[in-house]
Each structure stands twice: as structure tokens, then as C-alpha cells.
Amino acid sequence: MEGFNVVAWFGLFYPARTPAAHVAWLQSEVAEILKQADVRKQIAEWSGEPGGEPSAAFQRYVDQEVRQWQKVVDTAGITLP
């Protein structure tokens, strides 16, 4: 489909109302892990790109993905049994 980009992505989610300090700590720890040379090398071998964006940026990405795929579902008339 023209103008459509499909990628696999992974992310960490946490329960609603998780304290902001816990979220910030987890995001910081993950960002540090994703800076490690051996981790970056492994991700590159899988043809991936390390993320580590702050929670708000990741939330915007997830929201955009949901909107994009909702259009596909609606256009194709996909329903779950």
C-alpha cells in the first residue's frame, strides 16, 4: 500500500497509575542498557534499531500505530469471531 510502512516494534508497558518515579527509573535503566555496545550490536544483527525514547514519545508512537492499523481494520472490514 502506498505510503504505508510496516515495522515490528517492542516496548515496555506498565499498569496505569504506576508512580511517575517508578516509570522514570525504569525508562532510565532501559536507556542505559540500550547504550551498551554488546546490546546495540545484537540489535543491529537483528536489523533493529534501539529505542529508549521517553514514555511520552513512546506513547505518541503507540497512538499513531493504533490509528494506522485501525484504518486497515475498518477498511478491510476485519472482525474478530
Image (spheres, rainbow, N blue to C red):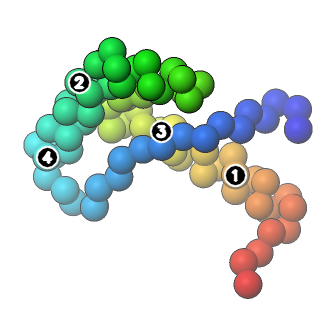
C-alpha gap between disc 3 and disc 1 = 14 Å
Which of labels 4 and 3 is toward the front? 4
Discs 2/3, front:
2
Q: Nearer the viewer, mark 2 or mark 1?
A: 2
In the rendered image, which residue does mark 4 sit on?
22
x and y, in percent, of residue 22 in the image: 13, 46
Residue 52 or residue 70, whichever sits in front: 52
* Residues packed near mark 3 inside 10 Å, few (<14), some (14 to 19) or many (20 plus): few
Disc on the earlier residue, 3 or 1: 3
Residue highlighted by disc 1: 69
* N-term-proximal mark, 4 vs 2: 4
Does label 4 or label 3 sit earlier along the sequence?
A: 4
> Where is residue 30 shown, x and y percent of the image?
26, 33
For marks 2 and 3, give the CA distance. Answer: 22 Å
The correct choice, above or below, for 36 with respect to 18 in the image is above
Does the CB distance between marks 3 and 1 fall below 8 Å? no
Q: Amino acid at mark 2?
A: Glu
Q: CA distance from mark 2 to mark 1?
A: 31 Å
- Left/right placement of residue 72 relative to residue 64 reads right
Above or below: residue 47 compared with residue 7: above
